[in-house]
Image (tube, grey):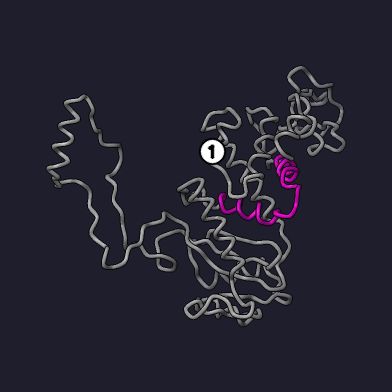
């Protein structure tokens, strides 16, 4: 559902509330979340109900994953639409502008939506058929230069450039002052390792060709952890696993059919490749580098969950409704 449809179908806050009530309660008939009593009062002016049994008042969001939200539910509907429509995500700043809310509110709101997406990702069927597995590393992108152009990069401490000092003095007399920004001096590192051996955060993914993808942040790429992920998400009897030459994958040959493509020699041979999972990694990295620029290790699983959710629902139009359903799930 796009923003135009939302504006037309939910012109008032009460319309949005009734829409959420359809997914919270059968036929939208309210039930007390505190004592499960069906005998409640009519809707009050502040859109709440009063239970005739325990005498407590409640709204549609009480004891749900939207419990305690101070935002209008109509804005949540707009947020669901805006976020699901952005294939590679969007920044909290953009969500702030679109909804006319504060940045902290937009930031927390977006993370709450990612949690709803994460809930959906845990209910996937086992992957089968041709299944590709690979890992990537998420972190700051560093410039790479040929060895002949590499040079030691340092801060400006202890360095003097007479011609620039002279120019600065001239402009200072004209009332123009240059001030150093806060934080550490800019410094580039041209020797940061890429891929395996890097200090970046590893993310492991398994994708069924033409089907769903499963991905998770995995601090330790041990054989035990990788095997556990395969056994949890892949139908071992109905799948053929395609991997690269990482030695750890060899330990999976004992329980699943596996084909290896050696990336040191070539990337694809007669349909044997890991291009599908590589394409998924491209989506995640473009999402992070293009929209967020940097994410912390603490929140990275949520960003990965967002990419997984959108990928798995790429051919469906129910992402919006799915988020509404998950938002109305009981909190505890």
Callout 1: few (<14), some (14-19), or many (20+) C-alpha neighbours within 10 Å?
A: many
Where does the image place residue 286, in percent across and percent down from the top left?
52, 53
Residue 107: quadrant of the picture: top right
Type of secondary structure dominating the magenta stretch: helix
**Residue 295 pos. (x, y %):** 47, 48
Q: As drawn, is 58 to the left or to the right of 262?
A: right
The answer to whether residue 309 is magenta is yes
Q: Is residue 139 above or below residue 105?
A: below
Where 222 sits versus 160, above or below? below
Asked whether residue 85 is drawn in magenta, I would say no
Q: Position of residue 89 (x, y in %)?
A: 58, 46
Residue found 40% across the figure and 61% down from its top: 199
| Percent x, y of residue 28 | 84, 33
Task: Tell me the residue that label 1 is attached to.
Answer: 92
Q: Is residue 56 visible?
A: no
Closer-to-camera residue (21/269)? 269
Region of the chain picked out in magenta, as a range:
302-330
Residue 157 seen anywhere in this rendered image of the structure: yes
Helix, strand or loop status at disc 1: helix
């Amino acid at each position: 559902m796009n923003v135009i449809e939302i504006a037309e179908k939910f012109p008032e806050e009460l319309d949005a509330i009734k829409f959420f009530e359809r997914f919270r309660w059968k036929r939208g008939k309210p039930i007390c979340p505190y004592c499960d009593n069906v005998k409640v009062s009519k809707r009050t002016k502040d859109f709440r109900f009063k239970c005739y049994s325990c005498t407590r008042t409640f709204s549609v969001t009480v004891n749900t994953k939207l419990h305690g939200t101070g935002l209008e539910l109509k804005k949540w509907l707009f947020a669901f639409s805006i976020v699901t429509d952005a294939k590679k995500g969007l920044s909290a700043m953009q969500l702030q502008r679109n909804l006319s809310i504060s940045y902290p509110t937009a930031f927390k709101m977006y993370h709450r939506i990612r949690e709803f997406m994460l809930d959906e990702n845990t209910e996937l069927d086992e992957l089968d058929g041709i299944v590709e597995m690979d890992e990537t590393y998420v972190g700051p992108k560093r410039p790479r230069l040929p060895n002949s152009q590499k040079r030691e990069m340092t801060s400006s401490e202890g360095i003097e450039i007479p011609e620039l000092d002279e120019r600065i003095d001239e402009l200072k007399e004209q009332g123009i002052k240059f001030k150093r920004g806060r934080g550490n001096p800019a410094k580039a590192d041209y020797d940061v390792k890429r891929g395996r051996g890097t200090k970046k955060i590893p993310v492991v993914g398994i994708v069924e060709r033409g089907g769903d993808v499963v991905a998770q942040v995995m601090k330790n790429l041990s054989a035990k952890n990788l095997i556990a992920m395969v056994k949890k998400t892949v139908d071992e009897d109905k799948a053929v696993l395609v991997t690269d030459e990482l030695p750890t994958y060899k330990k999976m040959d004992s329980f699943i059919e596996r084909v290896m493509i050696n990336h040191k020699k070539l990337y694809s041979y007669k349909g044997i490749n890991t291009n599908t999972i590589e394409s998924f990694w491209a989506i995640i990295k473009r999402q992070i580098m293009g929209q967020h620029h940097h994410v912390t290790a603490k929140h990275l699983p949520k960003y990965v969950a967002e990419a997984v959710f959108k990928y798995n629902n790429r051919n469906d139009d129910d992402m919006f409704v799915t988020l509404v359903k998950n938002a109305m799930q009981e909190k505890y």
